[in-house]
Amino acid sequence: MPVQLELAHRLAQLDHRMFHGMQRECAQLQHRLIGLARGLPDPGVLLEHAAQRADDLAERLPHALERRLDRAQHALAGLGARLGTPAQRLNQGASRLNGPAHKLDYLLHGHLRDHQRHLERTAGRLGLGEIRGRLSRHHQALAGLSERKRYAMGRRVGDAGETLRRLASLLVGLSYEGVLARGFALVRNEGGRLVPSAERALTEIALEIQQDILERVLWAEPSAVAISVREGEVEVAGELETRTDVAILEELIERVPGVVSLQSTVTSRSPNGNGERSRR
């Protein structure tokens, strides 16, 4: 086929070009390697220089070791002269310890004398009369402490009782019974659960009017009546089938828990309704 022949011819051309390109690349690399090889020194010359340096170092190494050992021997001799013999070191240590030993002996004898004098004074104060006097003073101190304890305990109990009475009064004022006694009420939804906030109560009122009254009782569309609830005041506006539906709607809204007042502008569509508005 012409297309296959054209593709085969194109592939042959590309293969030919790739082959010649690789040949040129290899030739260029070979030429570059030859140039780099010309710039490198002769390995034989490098090895000859390294061998000469190694021979020089091998000749100098024994003399360097001898000189190093000589210097180490001189350093050890100087250190030995500075250290001295063990007997000399012991004598020096003994002479340094003599002074602190004499000072310690003097301090120990002084401390023993002071302790002995203190014991003698204490023994003179430990007579029978001294003990009886101390016991009498201790009994008086204990009696005073007992009286202070009894007074402190009574005052502490009185303060605790007063605090307890204040807390009991505060608890009565803050309990839910006290709140209910001041005119508040517990609001529950249709499931019997408490409504925790005013916003939740407003939402519950609107939902109850829309779902329970309009949809389940009057069978009306939720969009037929617009409902607005604000702080227990309910406003409804829209249109129902009959005036009877309007009256039922208003009466049931007033029975919803949490409703304070009702403003209704709902009208009727039936002929007997005459398009009049009902307001409470």
Image (tube, grey):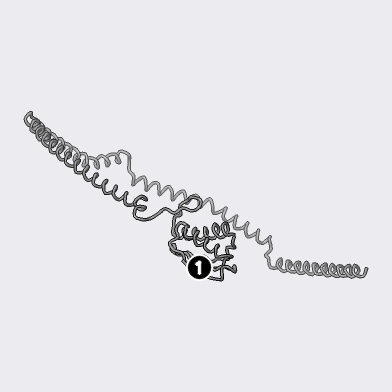
Task: Examine the rendered structure and indicate whether residue 237 appears above or below residue 252.
Answer: below
Q: Residue furthest front?
A: 272
Left of 66 or right of it: where is 177? left
Image coordinates of residue 65 in percent, x first then y, are 50, 50
Image coordinates of residue 174 in percent, x first then y, are 34, 52
- Say whether residue 223 is visible: no
SS at mark 1 in the image: loop
Left of 177 or right of it: where is 262? right
Image coordinates of residue 115 in percent, x first then y, are 14, 35
- Say whether residue 46 is visible: yes
Image coordinates of residue 188 in percent, x first then y, are 46, 53
Residue tagged 1: 278
Which one is in front, 237 or 199? 237
Label 1: how many residues lie within 10 Å, few (<14), some (14-19) or many (20+)? Answer: some
Which one is in front, 50 or 162? 162
Instruction: Locate residue 274: give its quadrant.
Output: bottom right
Q: Which residue sits at x=93%, y=68%?
A: 1
Left of 22 or right of it: where is 278? left
Which one is in front, 112 or 63? 112
Which one is in front, 178 or 214? 214
